[in-house]
Amino acid sequence: MFKPIAIILTASFFLISASLVPRYTNTPPQYSQLNARALGLGTAMTAVSGDEQCLFYNPAGLASIRGFRLGQSHSLRHFPGETRNLDQLDADPVALIFPLRFAGVFGAGFVLQGELGYDYLVRNEDIYPQHRLWGTERYDGYAGYITPWTKFGMYHRSNLLRQKSGDDVNQPMIEKQGEGGCFGIIQTLLPGLDYGYCAEKMDSDYVDGTGETVKRIRSGWSFKPFPWLLYVTDKEKIKVKLLSGETVDTQSEKRKNWGVEIAITPWTIVRWGKINGHPTSGLSLGFNRFKLHYGEAENMMPWIVGDDYPDKFKDLHLASYSVEL
């Protein structure tokens, strides 16, 4: 009964997203693929398995999924006084996961046009937003088992952004955005103890002698000593190479993330953690095969887009749902 529905939804993804595949590249925004469960766990998802959102963090985690999954996230914060319903940070990725019989798991992720980016980047006392950045993104992933204890996964990622500066009269300018891929593994060392590793590289086309390459390496642990308790920790290394004419500038950053998840009941789960020192928390409510998730992080927006930010809109709030068929 459910398999025809899964096939129809998967086919619909290709029909919708085929026209959205970008042909050019440059820098994608950070944290555009956030979801509520990951946010509550401090985004320490590198060694987590069985969640459809693993597609965006470490695709190897998809290998253990046995049924069709659908998940979507949405950012909840909006700016006051606007005639349009502007998001604080667009973070609305959709994930479709379809297990293939005897041949691993396929993952299709996308962000529809206008749901990827920041509606507010630079503060302006008179006009919100002063700088708007938005676009679309696509992930094509695959995962499977190398051994009964070793999962692997990979994805191809591409995106296309557009921006406006000043008021709404200005015409949007299309920016050529990032294209690249990721490879990851999850190794089970002991029952309940997993190690995860993934590496992503996103390149630009260096149009007119400018562009950049972003390399992101994540490694982490997942420890589940009891069915109701999960502890995760991640280390993240980011290296950015900027090219401008004859000048090449290299920047690097390291981050530490961790999270804890406790099942109060089989249908109620609470979370908390930290993203590089920023406290996070979350809650999930489930009924049968349907789950609702909420997550928030303190003072995240100034860290992402800069310190000049409205005081009431510094925290990040996300909601998401997931369905298993």
Image: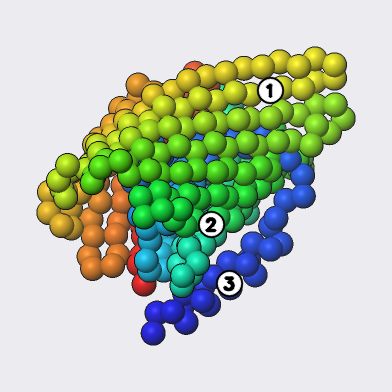
Residue closer to the observer: 258 or 186: 186
Quarter of the figure with residue 239 = top right
Of badges 2 and 1, nearer the viewer stands 2
Quarter of the figure with residue 238 = top right
Residue 226 visible at all:
yes
Indicate left or right for 23 with 216 as reference. Answer: right
Q: Which residue sits at x=69%, y=30%?
A: 213
Q: Which mark is residue 12?
A: 3
* Residue 106 to residue 243: above or below: below
For label 3, the crowd category at 10 Å Cα-Cα, with few meaning under 14, some 14 to 19 and many 20 or more, is: few
Query: Gap in Å between the C-alphas at discs 3 and 1?
Result: 37 Å
Q: Which residue is mark 2?
A: 142
Amino acid found under the numbered disc labelled 2: Tyr
Indicate left or right for 275 with 85 as reference. Answer: left
Labels 3 and 1: the sequence-earlier one: 3
Query: Gap in Å between the C-alphas at discs 2 and 3?
Result: 18 Å
Of badges 2 and 3, nearer the viewer stands 2
Labels 2 and 3: the sequence-earlier one: 3
The x and y percentages for residue 274 are: 32, 28
The x and y percentages for residue 195 are: 36, 38
Of badges 3 and 1, nearer the viewer stands 1
The x and y percentages for residue 47 are: 37, 41
Q: Which residue is mark 1?
A: 241
Colour scheme used in the picture? rainbow
The x and y percentages for residue 155 are: 57, 50
